[in-house]
Amino acid sequence: MTTRIHYGLVGCGMMGQEHLRNIALLDGAEVVAIYEPDAGMAAKAQALAPRARMVGSIAELLDVTPLDCLVIVSPNYCHADQLREIASRRPLPVLVEKPLYTDAADHALIAALRQNYPAPIWVAMEYRYMPPIAALIDAAPAATGGIRMLTIREHRFPFLQKVGDWNRFNRNTGGTFVEKCCHFFDLMRLILRSDPVRVMASAGQAVNHLDESYHGQVPDILDHGYVIVDFASGARAMLELCMFAEGAEYQEVISAVGPVGKVEAFVPGPGRFWPDHLGAPPVAKLVTSPRAPQGAVSHPIPVDPDLLEAGDHNGSTFYQHQRFLSLVRAGKGMPEVTLSDGAWAVRMGQAAQISAQERRVVSMDEID
C-alpha cells in the first residue's frame, strides 16, 4: 500500500489555498495541521481541509504527530525566520515558496542550511512545471542547436491584495524583481544551464498602486521593467515585465533562439482573471521555427481542466507536488529545486533591483 504522507502548512492565503487544493488531488497525501494567524484566511483553509488541526504557532505545528513534511506559504519576509525555527526544533522535509528569502543578511542562513539541514528543502518554483514551459525545456536543445538568446516576457495584471497589504512594499517583498521575477531568473539558469555574471535593468513604477496609501505610505513596488543578464556560457537572456497589461492573450511568452532555430512557449494566464467578453482563455502552445524555410510548427498543450481549476499556475503546482511527494515518500534523494537554486534566483533579483535603482551594470560578485 502507498505510505500516507502527513503535511503541515505554514500560511494559507491565496497561494496557500492553492497548495491545499492541489495536495487534496494527490494519492496518499493529507494536510493534518495548519498555522495561519489571520482569522479570515484560517477559516478558508479550514473549509478546504476540514480534518486539519488549526494551530497557533510554528512550535505548536511542529509538535503535531504524525507529521512528515511542511509547506511554507507565508509572506516573503517570514520565510528565513521560519526555516531557522524549523531547523532548530524539528527539521522535516520542506517545500518553501519563492522567494526563498528577501534580505541579503539571510544569505548566510541559507548557506548554513545547505551544509547542515538533514532533510530536503525544495524551493517552490512552479513555473518550471508549467506544461508548455516544461515542453520548451525539453525541446530547446534540438530546436535551437544550443541557445544563444533567451527572452521571457510577462504581460499581466497588477499585484493582488494580500493580508495586511504586505506585498505593497519592497521591505516586505524584496522588490518586484525578487518577489515576482525570481521564477524567471530561475528559468534562465535552468534553460541556459549556466550561471549569471552581470545584470543590467531599467524599471519603474508608472501606473499601479500610485493612488493607494497605507498608514500614510505610498507603495514603492516596481510595475514594469527590462532586465538583461549575461551568462558565463556567453548566452544572453532578457526579461520584459509589464504589470499593467491585463487581458493579454498570453501572460507569458518564452523564446529560445540558437543557430538552428527558435522555440517558443505561450502560456495563458489564470482563467479566473480572463475577461468574460473574450470567451474562453487560449490553450497553451509550443511553437518551433527552424531557420530553414519549412515554416513554424505549432503544438497545442492542453492542461487538465481539474488542474486549472485547482490553481492559477497552469497546472504546475500539482506537478510540483507530485515530485515533492515522491521525494518525501522515498526518504532520500535531492530536491529538483535546491537551496542553491533558490538563492541564485533571489540574488539575480537583488542585482536587478540595484541596477534599476542605481542605473548601472551590477556584477553578480557584488551580491553575497
Image: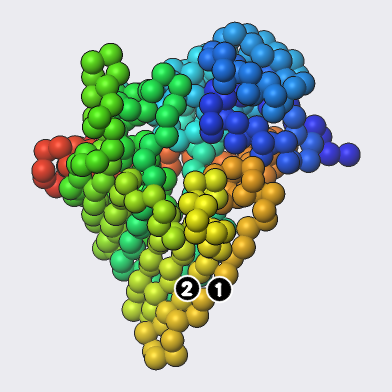
Taking depth in this image into account, of 39 and 10 the one nearest to the observer is 39
What element does badge 1 sit on? strand
- Kindly indicate whether the residue at mark 1 contacts the one at mark 2 (C-beta within 8 angstroms): yes
Q: What residue does disc 1 label? A: 299
Q: Amino acid at mark 2?
A: Val
Q: Is residue 6 above or below residue 62?
A: below
Mark 2–mark 1 distance (CA, rounded to whole Å): 6 Å
Mark 2 secondary-structure assignment = strand
Corner quadrant of residue 28: top right
On residue 287, the disc is: 2
Q: State whether residue 303 is above or below residue 171.
A: below
Residue located 63% across and 23% down the image: 44
Task: Judge the density around disc 2: few (<14), some (14-19), many (≥20) Cα neighbours within 10 Å.
Answer: some
Image quadrant in which you'd find residue 131 = bottom right
On the picture, is 366 further left or further right than 308?
left
Q: In the image shown, does 246 or 225 lie closer to the viewer? A: 246
Q: Is residue 293 visible?
A: yes
Task: Give coordinates of residue 84: x percent, y percent.
Answer: 47, 18
Q: Is residue 91 left or right of residue 256?
A: right
Q: What's the amino acid at mark 1?
A: His
**On screen, residue 168 above or below 332:** above
**The furthest residue to the right:** 1
* Residue visible at 39% across and 91% down in the picture: 293
Residue 283 occupies quadrant:
bottom right
